[in-house]
Amino acid sequence: MKCALGPALKVLALRMPALAIPVLAIPALLFAGTMRAADAPVVVTSIKPIHSLVSAIMQGVGEPELIVDGAASPHTYNLKPSNARALQEAKVIFWVGPGLEAFLEKPLQALGRDASIAELDNAPGLVKLPFREGGAFEPHDDGDEHDSASGQHDEADAAHDADPGHDSDHGAFDTHLWLDPMNAKAMAAMITTTLVAADPANALTYQGNAKALDDRLDKLDTEIKGIVAPVKGKPFIVFHDAYQYFEHRYGIRVAGSITVSPETIPGAERVSEIHRKVGELGATCVFAEPQFQPRLVNVVIEGTRAKSGVLDPEAATLKAGPDLYFNLMRGIANSMKDCLSSA
């Protein structure tokens, strides 16, 4: 037995160095991956569109947590205990600001004191638009006075030359800022700067991802212009007035909204006013939103030639992740095109 095993043992001994390297390398690689995950800062985001931008910039480093998940809306959201724990543990927190996520204002003061908090409605280069009032748009009860909006808009690029309005009081501007890809680029720049300051070890990854995201946003902008081109100028009605930024960028026209804010149920007089407006417009579209009452849309279009569609400005029906923002914007563009083309 000794003689028979001798040559085999010698062969095995000769092969051991070659075998040992990959075998030993596997735990080392696993350990390195664990270290990278452990080194990633705890990042918390408020809503899906912001989570998507942050996810794209953090790819290869870590994945941010999301507070308003699923079909929930920031307009009606109640903070959960798991959300409170995430805020306490966070190193970086991204939100739009108190004008949109009012439910977060006090928790951030109490729970996010150890975190770097980035309020993205302060991002340099943002275009901010005032709330619309007059005509088929309800007054916003925010204590401020705004000029009436006729529904006619300047060309998109001219809007981006306007004063960004960073000195505006919270609530004095429309907070659906992400519905213009150029605003998304401005917010992505602030996200990148914040992450690099909080986690300089991964700065090159954040900056490389941000450049790739910028390029994708430029391509998305060109794509959407092509999608909505056939229906530019066709008026339509939305559930709530969330689409100004999309309108200004792409030259489409919202003629009115059923309610000023989705958490406010419109009264009978308001519904009748919009019903009359739909009748005046003739063949048009009235768009519902996934989280809120579609029956109101049915009441508004009853007895008219109008058709109904669905727009999802907060991505309630979409899976969270780095591609969500692009799916959200394409979805809005295609919904408008499909409904208005057949109206």
Image (tube, rainbow, N blue to C red):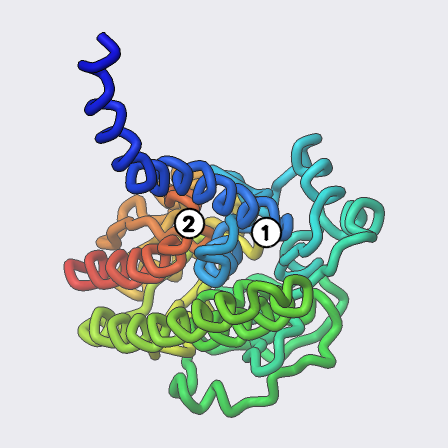
Mark 1 nearby-residue class (10 Å; few <14, some 14–19, many ≥20): some
Determine the residue positioned at 75% across, 55% down. 115
Horizontally, residue 128 falls left or right of residue 109, namely: left
Which corner quadrant holds the C terminus? bottom left
Report, in whole angstroms, how far the alpha carbon at label 2 lies from the one at label 1: 17 Å
Mark 2 nearby-residue class (10 Å; few <14, some 14–19, many ≥20): some
SS state under label 2: loop
Between marks 2 and 1 in the image, the one whose residue lies nearer the viewer: 1
**In the picture shown, does residue 301 fall above or below 149?**
above
Determine the residue positioned at 72% across, 63% down. 142
Residue type pointed to by label 2: Gly
Residue closer to the observer: 173 or 89:
89
Residue 233 visible: no
* Mark seen at residue 278: none
**In the picture shown, does residue 46 fall above or below 27?**
below
Determine the residue positioned at 70% across, 75% down. 145
Residue closer to the observer: 12 or 261:
12
Q: Position of residue 42 (x, y in %)?
A: 64, 48
Q: Position of residue 324 (x, y in %)?
A: 38, 53
Q: Name the residue that disc number 2 marks.
A: 321
Q: Position of residue 268 (x, y in %)?
A: 52, 44
Residue type pointed to by label 1: Ala
Determine the residue positioned at 41% across, 38% down. 24
**In the picture shown, does residue 273 fall above or below 190?**
above
Q: Mark 2 vs mark 1: which is more N-terminal?
A: 1
Q: Name the residue that disc number 1 marks.
A: 40
